Image (cartoon, helix red, strand yellow):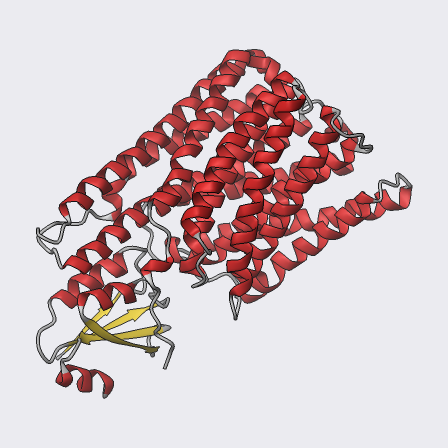
């Protein structure tokens, strides 16, 4: 299942805080789509440590779109990559 | 698809490195305020008085450069993805030498002692050399430098020029060496320090920080691409014209417009920043924004004052002109922006390091405080109003020292004591949570 979070109008560190709170709620098969106006370089090491995988790409509504799922969750990964 | 390579946390320095710079700076500001309180109007007679020069360098070296060096060591891995080599050693040495060098320079200004001057120049020279080489390596390693990195490179070159010119001026005035044209050299030294080192660093960093922290639209491409270069080229051309020390009229008639162009660049920057800030997407109260706006408004006023003084002798020849310009640019612009940025950088670093530790240990039972819990808006706002009152009083003291110098000094001490207290409180909150976030928790 996809969850979407638009953090494009928030100031640091709210995008990071809200993203980390949202990824903590992801269950098997779930992935999170983050809509962001900047590339969140500081998010990546935190995701790495927390055991998540991600993909950053150019967004349609915002400049960046980050797809996040739990590392090793194949069904979430294929759903995210196919989205 | 984009490159999603993450930043290695190992690249960033430990939090103690930037914090030692940030916590030392208000102490020098308090010392400067105490000196102004004790010696009173004597400090504001002329920009050439040794007391005034000592006071100015307590602030430019002990406060402004202290924060700027600490922030650069911290920010380079984040903004450029390029770590400073041996950052812990470089941070410790730069901090220690800058701290000792500033104190020694102050002693040398007051006593006129040649050994103190030599020691101060050596300490500061070595400290800045270590910083410039290390930061220079990190900056020139960046493969595809953007506008911010290009601007930072020019700021670092300007720092090197400022240090060399400062050493030459000090050698000349102290009688250690025999140098001519010291007035011209001093003017070039201070122009490169303020317009080059401080100005270009603030300008280039603001391209990243203003849109990011204040959620404004981006600076236009032409501003980011051309403004830092244009200012740097004008400053360099002005330096070359002035270094000839030829007092012929054509040099004067060429040098002034060239410097006017550089200064106009800053007027454009201040107007553009204020315009972007007026288009904020999310209008929540923000203390840093107040400091930035104050800095940008004073920058615009300083440019107008400078242009007025340069072209109308009735303004330029008054005894207040240089003092007002110095107070405006140092206390009104640079100190305001640096003070405001500390309220973003310090809570952000506290929060980020704790968050990273929490994720590493997956210690989710401990709540990491929100950024605004490290320094509350209320206490930061109180300090902003103290800073504003101190600035207004210092400007008044430049014109009527007998009346305003003591209130100005007291307000400056109060403002910086409150800044120090706010930062110390943030660090103590960081330490408390850091201890709670243990693997066994």
Q: Is residue B430 visible?
A: yes
Query: How many numbered discs?
Result: 0
Measured as percent of width and height from the top left, residue A18 is found at: 21, 61
Q: Is residue B360 above or below residue B295?
A: below
Taking the image as shown, residue B100 lies to the left or right of residue B43, namely left
Determine the image quadrant of residue B211. Answer: bottom left
Measured as percent of width and height from the top left, residue A39 is found at: 36, 68
Measured as percent of width and height from the top left, residue B56 is found at: 58, 28
Q: Is residue B281 above or below residue B50?
A: below
Taking the image as shown, residue B255 lies to the left or right of residue B358, namely right
Is B195 in front, or is A70?
A70
The quarter in which the N terminus of chain B is drawn is bottom left
Is B144 in front, or is B191?
B144
Determine the image quadrant of residue B423. Answer: top left
Taking the image as shown, residue B288 lies to the left or right of residue B375, namely right
Taking the image as shown, residue B227 lies to the left or right of residue B213, namely right
**Residue depicted at x 43% and y 42%:** B92
Is B13 in front, or is A69?
B13
Q: Is residue B65 above or below residue B234?
A: above
Determine the image quadrant of residue A43. Answer: bottom left
Measured as percent of width and height from the top left, residue B237 is found at: 76, 52
Q: Is residue B278 visible?
A: no
**Residue depicted at x 51% and y 36%:** B97
């Amino acid at each position: 299942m996809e969850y979407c979070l638009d953090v494009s109008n928030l100031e640091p560190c709210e995008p990071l805080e809200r993203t980390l709170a949202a990824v903590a709620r992801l269950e098997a098969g779930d992935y999170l789509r983050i809509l962001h106006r900047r590339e969140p370089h500081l998010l990546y090491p935190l995701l790495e440590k927390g055991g998540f995988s991600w993909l950053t790409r150019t967004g349609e509504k915002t400049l960046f779109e980050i797809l996040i799922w739990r590392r090793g969750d194949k069904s979430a990964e294929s759903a995210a990559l196919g989205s | 698809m984009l490159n999603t390579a993450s930043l290695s946390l190992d690249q960033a320095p430990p939090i103690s490195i930037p914090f030692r710079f940030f916590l030392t700076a208000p102490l020098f500001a308090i010392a400067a305020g105490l000196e102004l309180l004790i010696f009173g109007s004597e400090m504001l007679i002329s920009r050439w008085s040794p007391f005034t020069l000592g006071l100015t360098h307590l602030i430019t070296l002990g406060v402004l450069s202290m924060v700027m060096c600490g922030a650069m060591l911290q920010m380079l891995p984040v903004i450029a993805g390029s770590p400073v080599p041996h950052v812990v050693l470089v941070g410790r040495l730069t901090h220690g030498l800058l701290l000792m060098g500033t104190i020694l320079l102050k002693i040398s200004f007051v006593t006129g002692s040649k050994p103190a001057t030599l020691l101060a120049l050596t300490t500061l020279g070595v400290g800045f050399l270590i910083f410039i080489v290390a930061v220079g390596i990190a900056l020139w390693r960046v493969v595809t430098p953007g506008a911010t990195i290009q601007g930072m490179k020019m700021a670092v070159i300007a720092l090197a020029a400022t240090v060399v010119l400062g050493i030459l001026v000090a050698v000349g005035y102290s009688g250690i060496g025999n140098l001519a044209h010291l007035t011209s050299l001093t003017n070039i030294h201070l122009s490169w320090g303020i317009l080059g080192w401080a100005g270009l660093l603030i300008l280039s960093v603001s391209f990243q920080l203003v849109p990011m922290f204040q959620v404004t639209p981006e600076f236009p491409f032409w501003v980011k691409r051309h403004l830092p270069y244009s200012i740097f080229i004008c400053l360099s051309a002005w330096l070359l014209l002035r270094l000839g020390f030829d007092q012929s009229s054509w040099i004067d008639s060429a040098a002034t417009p060239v410097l006017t162009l550089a200064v106009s660049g800053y007027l454009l920057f201040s107007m553009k920043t204020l315009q972007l800030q007026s288009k904020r997407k999310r209008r929540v109260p923000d203390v840093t924004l107040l400091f930035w706006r104050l800095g940008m408004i004073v920058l615009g006023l300083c440019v107008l004052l400078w242009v007025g003084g340069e072209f109308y002798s009735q303004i330029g020849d008054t005894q207040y002109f240089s003092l007002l310009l110095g107070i405006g640019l140092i206390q009104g612009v640079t100190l305001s922006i640096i003070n405001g940025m500390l309220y973003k950088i310090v809570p952000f670093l506290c929060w980020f390091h704790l968050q990273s530790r929490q994720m590493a240990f997956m210690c989710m039972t401990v709540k990491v405080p929100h950024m605004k819990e490290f320094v509350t808006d209320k206490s930061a706002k109180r300090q902003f109003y103290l800073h504003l009152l101190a600035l207004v009083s210092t400007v008044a003291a430049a014109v009527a020292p007998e009346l305003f110098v003591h209130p100005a000094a007291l307000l400056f001490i109060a403002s910086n004591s409150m800044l120090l207290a706010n930062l110390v409180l943030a660090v103590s909150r960081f330490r408390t949570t850091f201890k709670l976030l243990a693997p066994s928790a």
